[in-house]
Image (spheres, coloured by chain):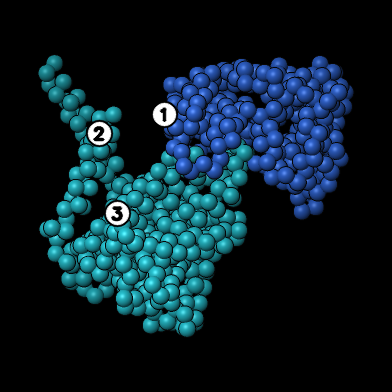
Amino acid sequence: MSFILETQDLRHDFKGMKVIRGVDLQIRQGERHAIIGPNGAGKTTLFNLVTGMYRPRHGHILFKGQDVTKLKPYKRNRLGMGRSFQITSLFEHQTVFEHLRLGILSRMGVRYNFFKPMTMVKGLTEEVDAMLARVNLSEYRDQWASLLSYGKSRALEMTLTMATNPDLVLLDEPCAGMSAEETRNAVGLIRELTTGKSMIIVEHDMDVVFSLADRVTVLHYGKILACDTPSEIQKNKDVKDAYLGHGMKKQ
Amino acid sequence: MAGNIKKLVLGFILLGAIGIAPRFLGIISLNMAVELAIGALFAVSLNLLLSYTGLLSFGHALFFGMGAYVMGISITYMDGITLIPAILMGSLAAGLTALIFTPLLVRVTGTAFSMLTMAFGQLMYVLCIKMRGITGGEDGLTLFDMPLLSVPGVFSLDMTDPATLYYTVMGVVLISIGCMWYFTKTPLGGVQAGIRDNAQRVEYLGFHVSASKAVIFIISGTFAGLAGCLAAIFQQVISVDGFLRINVSFMPIMAIMIGGLGHFLGPVIGTIFLMFLNQMAMRYTDKVELVFGIVFIMVVMYAPYGIHGLWVKARIYWGIFRHRKGALGKEERT
């Protein structure tokens, strides 16, 4: 079995407060993997360790078999790792088109070119327009991102992450704060965009998790409590005690 | 499309006006135009950092002065040097200075960046006063015999002739501003705008933010150095107060803020405005800086996007006004 991402005994703390206490995560090639856990379980911290925002105090991160523990975020991206943000992170004064153009430029490897105008980079405009059409954002092409509705800006956030064509995508609560209909659209979009790719998703909405994920990891106080298929996780007694039982009863 | 044609026609009219101006302007106005052009180039080079990358540099005079001093020193100490290599050396030295400082500067943002640039600027100011042997200290360098701007056997221009100087400066400034405008349209220009709005996101899209910033910083520094060279040719005296003092750094910032932050030609508008304000204020008071300060405060408080912002606002209100009038007219008819 080949893993696209592997963490070995990952540990991290903030000023002595242990947030991640030895996580061994294994993500298979091409699977959709969900990470769930109560608030403060360390999900976002784990995300930030994997994508390179923080450097772990201890342990290793292997991506495609390569040790990336000490690599900067941009290098991890170039290796094929992309992430979206929990709090929508876009470019305020730029149009939807300009957002995706930046993503596609990165995919094409055009990074320091200051001799050729962007309109003359071969295939750039066409690819951006194709991508916009694919995610039904064409009608907002020339609108500023700051003027989009919440659902649309979340969609742009995800599309921008996918524009660099990563092999592994990490989505940090893509459906947080969405209405039921927006969530349905978002799940459809995630399915569409991540076909044939590996994905890690952190999400509080259990419907989203259980409809999308192939496997689920439950994080509890910085440790992995269980890692199994969604149906097995729902049966798991430890998980119920720690977290799910509470939520499931409500539903 | 119609807008583009309008802009093109406007551009040609402007170009024509610049071309025939020396026939109508007196020597004083001509010199003012030269000063204005140099100031505009300097401000546009800073605007590349401020409006397009979101970096507020309080020490841009460092590059302006570096260009001027290196050019002045090469003219003073190298016999027989013509102006073109001297200017090239000046601008490249400014770019090189930017390169030397980048490892430190690209790692900080916001206030820390501003303060650090100011510190480096002041450092150079003091250094130039202390290195009396080379820079002439407080007396500065006087370029008694200005070399010719020439390529042997092709052309030769005398920079002490006001009209020739005017055309040369205008040409260099227009080409440089054109280059910088072109730059904002290239992929690196796109990355730069991304860094301004959200550097973290740009990093996660696979761009090396620090390296991109460094390239932009060097380009901005080089053009600031070029502006310094032109100013030195124009004034023929290079002094620490005229080229390296902190107020030299503040002038382009004021021009950008007054002209319109976020717009490419904002600093040009701002420089023109400040020039006229200077002329007007000088007639009534010798406390010109006070007038500048009050205007600057007013702009920051009531028109944060400067003259360009006011223009955009006026157009929006005009649109609303016309729309309402149209709606009223319809009502009356029915």
Do the residues indicated by labels 3 and 2 lie within the same chain of the protein? yes
Examine the rendered structure and indicate whether residue B48 appears above or below residue B11. Answer: below
Tag 3, which chain? B
Asked which secondary structure carries label 3, the reply is: helix
Q: CA distance from mark 3 to mark 2?
A: 23 Å
* Chain colored blue: A
Q: Please name the residue that numbered disc 3 is placed on.
A: B171
Mark 2: amino acid: Ile
Examine the rendered structure and indicate whether residue B173 appears above or below residue B58. Answer: above
Of the residues under marks 3 and 2, which one precedes in the sequence?
Answer: 2
Residue at horizontal 53 percent and vertical 51 percent from the top: B215
Quarter of the image for the N terminus of chain A: give it.
top right
Tag 1, which chain? A
Please provide percent x and percent y for residue B31: 22, 65
Do the residues indicated by labels 2 and 1 lie within the same chain of the protein? no
Residue at horizontal 27 percent and vertical 63 percent from the top: B157
Asked which secondary structure carries label 2, the reply is: helix
Q: CA distance from mark 2 to mark 1?
A: 21 Å
Image-quadrant location for residue B13: top left
Q: Which mark is residue A142?
A: 1
Image-quadrant location for residue B69: bottom left
Is B230 positioned to the left or the right of B89 in the image? left
Residue at horizontal 47 percent and vertical 53 percent from the top: B219
Residue at horizontal 49 percent and vertical 39 percent from the top: B187
Asked which secondary structure carries label 1, the reply is: loop
Which colour represents chain B? cyan
Q: CA distance from mark 3 to mark 1?
A: 35 Å
Is B180 positioned to the left or the right of B192 in the image? left
The residue positioned farthest toward the front in the image shown = B153
